[in-house]
Amino acid sequence: MDPKGEPEETVRPSIGGEDGGGGAIILALTICSAAIGGTFQYGYNISIINAPTSYIQTFINDTYTERWGSGLESSQLTLMWTIIVSAFSLGGLLGALLAGPLSVRFGRKNSLLLNNGFLFAGAVLVLTSRVAKSFEMVIFARFLVGINSGVSMNVQPMYFGESAPTHLRGAVAFSSAVFTAFGIFLGQVVGLTEVLGAQHLWPYLLASNALPGLIQLLTLPWFPESPRYLLIDRGDKDACVKALGRLRGGVAPISEVEEMLEEQEQQKTAALNSGSSANKTPWTLFKDAGLRSQLRTVMAASSAMMLCGNDSIYFYAYYIFLAAGIPPRKIQYITIGTGASEFTASILSNLLIERSRGVAGMAYLSMACVFAYILSFGLGPAGVSGILPAEIFDQSARPAAYMVAGSCMWVSLFLVGMLFPFIVKGLGDFCFLPFFVVCVAAAVFLGLTLPETKGKTLAEITADFDGRNGKRNEYSDVEMDEPMREQYQLGQAASLTNLMLDPDSKPDLESIQPQGNV
């Protein structure tokens, strides 16, 4: 009830209006177009490298023999293979560091489009490597593909989190994990001998990642940029309202516009108080005592996601199942089960997140344990870790937070990729015990430090963390000017036409200025 005793008119901040169904379609197509050239590529590229393992090793050894007159020893060949695997992780680290500046300078959507350049360059290198008789070209190609994955793993969840309505934010952001798992599964299917997994086809298998990138280049330009980026970072209210209207079916919910305006005012106030620019850098995040709890949580979650050892299964599935006693000819089919397990788990999580050797058969028991391990990973860390920076950091800190989270993730993946073959050699059947310790430690830490974010606004989540930081929420008293508040009354719907207001009648809206670099 309002102060006059009359019922308040409320509009749920969701896909609504007379054409809400159209908004749902646009949002769904935006997700698919961004993800097919985004996190899908990460999953696809960590799985396609497994099928041609022996073929690429043969290529390396033959090339080395032709150059130097003698082949590599087994340990040397294993080391070369780990370098190829780890080049992807090093590229991912660089991509994670590039993602923040790219997303601020070019926007979320354009960053994803530009990111495909690394992918196409890698495809050219791997296709010409056999003709050039250079395994170094394969290493560099994997490095470039890693850059592509590093950028997309940071920018895409940011893009989704800023484009989705609050009540769908978790499910939409979690779709990044669904596409990652789908990429893993499809990469394993394409890697079958009957498809592109034959010995003479391995360069085409590694270059097949260019096709999803091409699909994204042809489709994503037709969909909206992040409305929050357009308003808060660029100060373009007309473009923001237009993009938000398309994503919500022709109607831009006024509650969402008001929330973005309030966040912009908060960031302007904070920037004036601190005397620094609105957009934060990773270094300023570490120096900000008010963000330490958030930063610790994100760093722990991102590191644990890779140190739990799940992705090492995809890199070294051939070795794992061979050591478990699976016949070599069956391994390529069984590895599909690992991808199917994570794909299934990610879909289940997406549906639930907004509602809440000597013994016969022992080899296949080991296989079942691996599947169960991947299922548990897909139900938790696979999707939630990617969402966290978008959920718990504001617009000015979000790109830098993703840079820190991505760096932790890719450094951890690099360490696992380099060390896992030697862990297997040293610990044998107990090679996953170190990862078990990481999982337990991460579960305890996150259980104690991470508040529930479901259905909460950024201000509410920030208040929870402020309590943990021992800090009063500095934004709690920030109010918009009264004329602006009267124009943007919470709960009143606004169509695209009545939000495109005459400048003379809405003077306060003209005070919106770009924040940060453009």
Image (cartoon, rainbow, N blue to C red):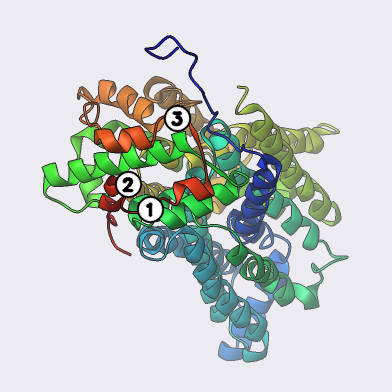
Near mark 1 (Cα within 10 A), the count class, few <14, some 14-19 or many ≥20, is few
Labels 1 & 2 near each other (Cβ < 8 A): yes
Residue at coordinates 43% horizontally, 56% vertically from top-left?
Answer: 238
Q: Nearer the viewer, residue 396 or 14?
A: 14
Q: Nearer the viewer, residue 450 or 234?
A: 234
- Left or right: 414 with respect to 367? left
Q: Nearer the viewer, residue 408 or 113?
A: 113
Disc 1 to disc 2, C-alpha distance: 7 Å
Residue 351: percent from the left, percent from the top?
68, 31
**Mark 3 or mark 1, whichever is nearer to me:** 1
Query: Where is mark 2, residue-wise?
Result: 506
- Left or right: 160 with respect to 206? left
Q: Earlier in the sequence, mark 3 or mark 1?
A: 3
Residue type, mark 1 in image: Asp
Near mark 2 (Cα within 10 A), the count class, few <14, some 14-19 or many ≥20, is few
- Left or right: 228 with respect to 42? left
Query: Where is mark 1, residue-wise?
Result: 502
Residue type, mark 3 in image: Ala
Q: Quadrant for residue 310, please give it.
A: top right
Residue at coordinates 62% horizontally, 43% vertically from top-left?
Answer: 175
Task: Identify the element where label 2 is drawn.
Answer: loop
Q: Which mark is residue 442?
A: 3
- Extreme top residue here? 5
Q: Is residue 512 above or below residue 15?
A: below
Would residue 397 be visible to someone looking at this image? yes
Residue 307: percent from the left, percent from the top?
48, 42
Disc 3 to disc 1, C-alpha distance: 53 Å
Residue at coordinates 29% horizontally, 51% vertically from top-left?
Answer: 512
Residue 71: percent from the left, percent from the top?
62, 79
